[in-house]
Every structure is written in C-alpha cells, then in structure tokens.
Amino acid sequence: MKKSLLFFLFVLIPSFAFSDEPIVVVKHENPARRETTYVINSHGCIIGWELERFYDGRGFGIGEKSKCDLPLDQQARFRGAILEKVIADTNNMQGMHNFVWGTLLRGDANDEYARRFTIAVSKLPQWDKKTGQLTGKAAKDISFFPNLINRENVFSELTALFSAHNLTLHAEDMEIVIVGNVDIPEAGITKQDKYPVDARLLFKVTKIAGK
C-alpha cells in the first residue's frame, strides 16, 4: 500500500474517549486514487484500513496501518467495527481479494504477532538457529512461512474476527525482513541464536463456502 490520505489521518485526527458510546469510524473517499480510508482513533489507539480498488475493476484489497497499545482482544472490537463498515460498503465484500498486514513489528501491542511467529519458528526442525536460515527443502518452499502462520494460527484474533463474518483469512505471501537475535526466555530463545523477528505479510480473503 502506498502512502495516501490514511497517513495524514493518523496525524490530523484528534483522539477522543468514550465509554458506552458507539465506536466511530471516520470514512474518507478519494475517487481519483480509487481509495477509501476507514479510521478509528480512541483511547490513544489508532487503527486505519485503506481500501484500494484494482484498476481492472475486478476487485479490491485492504491494507492496515495502526498504532495501538490496547490488548489484542480489545483492538479486535475496533477492527470489527471497521470490517462491518467495509462489508456494508462493498455488498458483503464482493470483489475482496487480499488483506495486507504489512510488517509484523509496529512498536506497539501488535508486536505480539511477531513474538508468536518467532516462537513458532523456534520449534521447527528445519530452522538452523546458528545460521538463521531454513534448511533442506523448506529453504526453497516460498509457502513455508505462510503455511506456518496458518497452521499455528498466529493471528488468532484476526482470523476469528473475519470468521465471525463468514470470511476466511489465509496467509498467502510472506517476506522475511529481519533475521536477528531476540531474547524470549520463556520460549527458550536467547540472544545467542538467530531467528526471524520481522516480516511483511499478506493474507488472502475468501468467503466461507455456503455462507
């Protein structure tokens, strides 16, 4: 996803507090760029989705930008409000193709996903923690890490959210960005070993058959 109005909304929209009030989703259309942005800014938590329509007119993709230190289950409430708005605006997600999460490390509570991914990799017999690389056939399998994300349900809060709306979220493409030393003592991971600590991730979104 390229920079657009969503980047500036993160800066310009003041935060607001609410208790029992409905969650407010701020929507902005940019017809020239074929984009629609949806932003929630509450309790110091900013979550924005950018819907970008493909130029061939056959569908759209969504990318997220966020900065939020609320627990992941609370963030899911905000993401759910945006998802419901997108569903209403797109005839029940007609033409939806992918959801771009972007990098795992964001410097907020969402870094938990990077932590889960690192721990999942540490359990793999195909990972060489000394060289920081996959070994054997796995090294040439471009679907290896996306399959791991799906198998271990690393993004459990996000997959549950989409599933509740009869949508399947399936990790499809992943590019490792950073392999380095990380310390997660409770998982037996020490700074002497090398593990993937960040990556770019794209999900494929499909409707659950029969729903």
Image (spheres, helix red, strand yellow):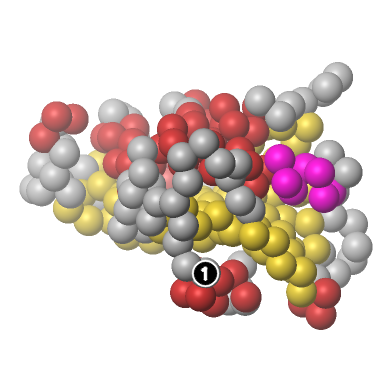
**Picture layout, residue 122 above or below residue 105:** above
Q: How many marks?
A: 1
**Residue 110 covered by magenta stretch:** no
Residue 147: x and y, percent? 52, 34
Helix, strand or loop for the magenta stretch, by majority: helix
Residue positioned 58% across, 76% down in the render? 3
From the image, which quarter does the N terminus lie in? bottom right
**Magenta stretch bounds:** 84-90
Q: Left or right: 129 with respect to 169?
A: left
Say what secondary structure mark 1 lies in. loop
Residue sticking out furthest to the bottom: 32
Splitting the image into 4 quarters, where does residue 61 fall? bottom right
Splitting the image into 4 quarters, where does residue 37 fall? bottom right
User: Can residue 200 be seen by looking at this rendering?
Assistant: no
Residue positioned 89% across, 57% down in the render? 58
**Residue 89 covered by magenta stretch:** yes
User: Can residue 41 be seen by looking at this rendering?
Assistant: yes
Residue 126: x and y, percent? 34, 35
Splitting the image into 4 quarters, where does residue 136 fall? top left
Residue positioned 75% across, 36% down in the render? 206
- Which residue carries the number 1 mark? 13
* Amino acid carrying mark 1 in the image: Ile
Residue sticking out furthest to the top: 210
Residue 138: x and y, percent? 44, 39
Q: Left or right: 50 with respect to 160?
A: right
Residue 41: x and y, percent? 50, 57
From the image, which quarter does the C terminus lie in? top right
Residue positioned 81% across, 64% down in the render? 54
